[in-house]
Amino acid sequence: MQNKDWWQEASIYQVYPRSFKDTNGDGEGDLKGVITKLPYLKDLGVDAIWLSPFYTSPNKDGGYDVANPRDVDSRFGTLADAVELIEKTHELGLRIIVDIVPNHFSTEHIWFKEALNSPKDSAARKRFHFYDGRGLTGEIPPNNWCSIFGGPAWSRVTEMDGSLGQWYLHLFDSTQADLNWNNLEVAEDFEKTLRFWLDLGVDGFRIDVAHGLVKDEIHRDHRDPEGLTRALRLDVSDMPQEQRESLLSDVPFFDREGVHEIYRSWRKILDSYPGERMSVAEAWVHPSSRAVRYVRADELHQIFNFDFLIAQWNSEFLINAIDKTLQEVAEVAAPATWVLCNHDSPRLVSRLGGGKLGLRKARAMALLTHALPGGVYIYQGEELGLEDAVLPDEARQDPVYFRTNGVDKGRDGARVPLPWDSKLKNYGFTTGEPWLPMPDNWQTNSVDQQQKNFVEGSAEEQSQFGLYQESLKLRKNLRGLSFSWIEKSDSVLAFSRGGGYFVFTNTTDGVIKRELPRTGDGTSIILSSVAGAELVDGHLTLPAHSTVWLQTF
Ligand code: NOJ
């Protein structure tokens, strides 16, 4: 496939395989399910898909606890299915990127088992962070860090002779042992994994916890480890901003200088393959000016910009986020990315308040986002207008829920399987029992209804799917066009792309009128997030909470 730099302004769709489509009735999605629904994704109009992990895993953290990164978990199918998926995706003219999880391995990985059966100071233990504890009997962990999922970041092992022994580091669940990236064997193994999937034809990688690989301060306690964990959590709102900023400005296990060397070597591998392979970093780095260091010319291609993932429906916030992002990526000549939701965060409609109003704001937010320069990431179900499902606690599976003793409900609400067909049991997701219960009011969100509701050219009848389909099609025309502000106020964001496209967003609950910067018969509305937008004599009427795209022909 040609198209150099295809990723720069691509629309990339995140498939969370476990919840996408089940074909064998076990209640969990599988790779064959993704294959059967590729035409749907083509029809939606995305350029590429990114698959969350489908590798061999005991599934303690939704597959981000990898036991064998070079094989497919039987729950998802076989390696042959993965090969077929890669081929079929390419046949449809789409690209495919896969997750790589370099910060940790599952404690079911053969290396960890070997480490448990080896003495301290052995080569097997040096692939992870094994240390003696402090205190008279080693009963105090090597440092006071907390796990990002709650509780301590260290667990103690039982040695082969039955005695309590060393501790190993896990920034996430205790079943996810952090790897020691100072060990050459670790780097070599990941190089092997990269090449394994590149040889099979994937177009790139999404790098999990890309900022976490290097830990060079293990022998120092943190001044406020619990505060730090809270500061790292997106849902904690009661912490004063100043305290949060201060804690996040120096996280001892994140964003250490050594990570950049790793990505420089990965870039060389990616560049050595034909066909423009790419990488995108999941790296929560503060301040964001440091985040763009991951996308310097000889490092990674993209880094998720999570500003919109936490954005409120507020002009000032949105304007600042856009300005900051565009300015920062320009400094390293990298393209921006925009993310409205993913499998770790509340769904967009819910975050914006839920219900009809939440959906209305989400539609306006999506059209605003799709008009910005750079790449867009779409999380499965976003195009159906799904909200987070309300789940009974007994159904929850996220380790965050368990490690915080239920204080934090975790991320399962955004991971409920997709509704494909309003007429079928479990909305056609599975013939078995879905791994998370599906709400009983998702009929209108189901793909069959969403696709039916799309009436071209009729904003009144546009479904969320129809709106996404239209904006993903139109945004292809914006590729490479310049961006300039027309208005930045507390009620309206307006900008032009290339001088021929205009985008207006009204973040208030009242109707707003604006005179167009360039009027004439040749300008018309090409897309609107709601009905009621009008252009009369060069005057634009913007309905409450809306985004409108115009084009001068
Ligand atoms: C980020 C992933 O998106 C999340 O789902 C996972 O729990 C953590 N990294 C740990 O791998």
Image (cartoon, rainbow, N blue to C red):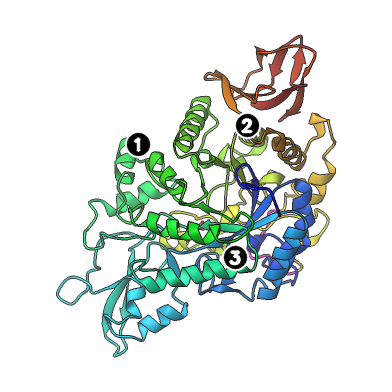
Find residue 535 and report its image quarter.
top right
Please tell me the numbered disc located at residue 198: 3
Name which residue lies at 65% across and 64% down. Answer: 201
Q: Residues within 10 Å of mark 2 (few under 14, many from 20)?
A: many
Percent position of residue 178, x then y: 38, 67
Residue at mark 2? 368
Tell me the SS state at disc 2.
Answer: helix
Name which residue lies at 14% across and 75% down. Answer: 136
Name which residue lies at 66% across and 26% down. Answer: 546
- Looking at the rendering, the stretch of residues picked out in magenta corresponds to 432-439
Q: Is mark 1 within 8 Å of ligand 1?
A: no
Amino acid type, mark 3: Leu
Q: Residues within 10 Å of mark 3 (few under 14, many from 20)?
A: many
Q: Quadrant of the N terminus?
A: bottom right
Tell me the SS state at disc 3.
Answer: helix
| Chain-order first, disc 1 or disc 3 | 3
| Chain-order first, disc 2 or disc 3 | 3
Percent position of residue 116, x then y: 36, 82
Residue at mark 1? 241
Can residue 384 be seen here? The reply is yes
Front-most of 275 and 329? 275
Amino acid type, mark 1: Gln
| Left or right relative to 519: residue 298 | left
Percent position of residue 219, x then y: 22, 63
Find residue 174 and report its image quarter.
bottom left
Q: Residues within 10 Å of mark 1 (few under 14, many from 20)?
A: few
